[in-house]
Amino acid sequence: MPCLIAALLAVACLTATAAAGAEKGFALAVEPRPFVFPRDHGAHPEFRTEWWYYTGALRDTSQRLYGFQLTFFRVGLVPELKGRSSRWATRDVLFAHFALTDVRAGRFRYAERTGRPVLGLAGFSTSSLNVFIRDWSARMDGQRMRLKASFDDATLELTLTPERQPVLNGERGLSKKGPGKGNANYYYSIPRLRTTGILRKGGRSIRLTGMTWMDHEWGTSELAPNQKGWDWFSLRLSDGRDLMLYVLRDEKGRPTSYSSGMLVEPSGQSRRLALPDFRVRPLAYWTSPRSKGRYPSGWELSVPGADLTLRVEPLVKDQELITTGTTGVTYWEGIVRAGGSSRGRKVSAEGYVELTGYAPGSRIGPGSTR
C-alpha cells in the first residue's frame, strides 16, 4: 500500500515500551532485492510490518455483483524472543479485516479479528502463503490461492488462479514512501486472479465468479512525519490493462512527491508512474454519519502519457470501516466502477479504492503505507 492501511496497524498493538524503539533490530527495506516465489508469498518476520491484501469483484449466476476485501496484517512486537519459555510467548501479532459489499442491496458489512500466532490459534508460514486467524485464512494450494473468511451468519470461500505473473511495484519491488533511510517497503501485486467460490448464508450456497487483486507488502520504517494519509486505486480495465495509483497526502492535503503507481499492459509488461505522470481529481464527496470523515466519492483519473482517462465512482457510498477492535484505523475501502477512454477507445473498469486519513482523530500510524 499505500495500499492499505496496513501499516497503520502496526502501532496499534505495540506497547509503550516496545513502541519507543519499535524499529530497532528489525530489517529495513533499503535497496531492490530478488523476489522468489512461492517463498515471497510467505511472511518476512525480520521486518516489522507486513500485510496480504485481497480485493475483488464477484458475480453470482444472476449477475448480482458483490465486492469483497480480506486483509491479513502481521506486526512484529520485538525482533526476537529472549528468555521467554511460555507457550504464549510471541514476537508477532496478527490482525485481519473482512468486508463484503452487496451492490444491488446497497449493503456493506465488515468484521475484524486479532490473533497471537501460538498454540495453533493463528499463524503464518515463511516458506509460502499460509496466514490464518482461527478459521479465517489465505493459503497456497499448488499454484492457486484459497481464501476463507466469515461473519456470524455467512462464510465466503474462494479459489484464486493467477492469470499473470506478479508485478513488482516501485523500483524492482522497492516502494519508497519517504526520504529517510529504509522509509520504504517491498511491494508486489497480482492484479488478475481468476476467482471462483461460494458464499454460504441463510442456508443457501451462492456460487460466485470474478476477479481478485492481491497486494503483498512488507517493511519496517514509518511514513514521513508530514504524511497524513493516502488515496489508493486498483483498476482492471476492459482492454486488459491494469492500473494502480496511490497519492500520499501531506498535512495540508497536498500530494507528496512519493506518490506513485504502475500501469500493466495485457502482455504483463509494466510501467512505473511517478507523480508527474498521472492526475487524480475528486469530483464529489461523502460524509460518514458515524466518523464524520469527509471522503472523496468520485474521481477523474488520467495518465496522459498512456492515453488513458477514467471517471471512477463508488458502487455504494458507505463502505467505511471503523476498526476499533484491531488497528484503531478508520478508513474507506470499497468496490468502484469506471468508464472512459484508453488509447482512443471506449473502456470500462472495475476495482477498489482505499482512503485513509480523512476521519477526525483516526490514526494513520507508524509503519504504515502501501
Image (cartoon, helix red, strand yellow):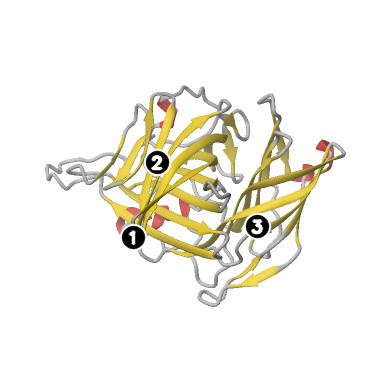
Q: Position of residue 144 (x, y in %)?
A: 44, 29
Check disc 2 and report the residue beneath it. 147
Instruction: Between label 2 and label 1, give the one nearer the viewer.
Output: 1
Q: Residue at x 57, y 63 (%)?
A: 357
For residue 30, the mark is none
Foreground of the two, 210 or 237: 210
Which residue occupies the foreground of this view, 159 or 326? 159
- Residue 235 at x, y = what percent? 65, 44
Q: Is residue 18 left or right of residue 305?
A: left
Against 199, is 108 above or below?
below
Question: Label 1 crowding class (10 Å Cα cut-off): few <14, some 14-19, many 20+?
Answer: few
Q: Secondary structure at mark 2?
A: strand
362 horizontally vs 26: left or right? right
Residue 351 image position (x, y, % from top left): 62, 48
Provide the secondary structure element on which disc 1 rests.
Answer: loop
> Mark 1 or mark 2, which is nearer the start of the sequence?
2
Question: Which residue does the numbered mark 1 point to in the structure image?
Answer: 153
Residues tagged 2 and 1 counted as in contact (Cβ below 8 A): no
Circles 1 and 3, Cβ within 8 Å, touching? The answer is no
Residue name at image x 41 percent, y 54 percent:
97
- What residue is rendered at 53% in x and 53% in y? 66
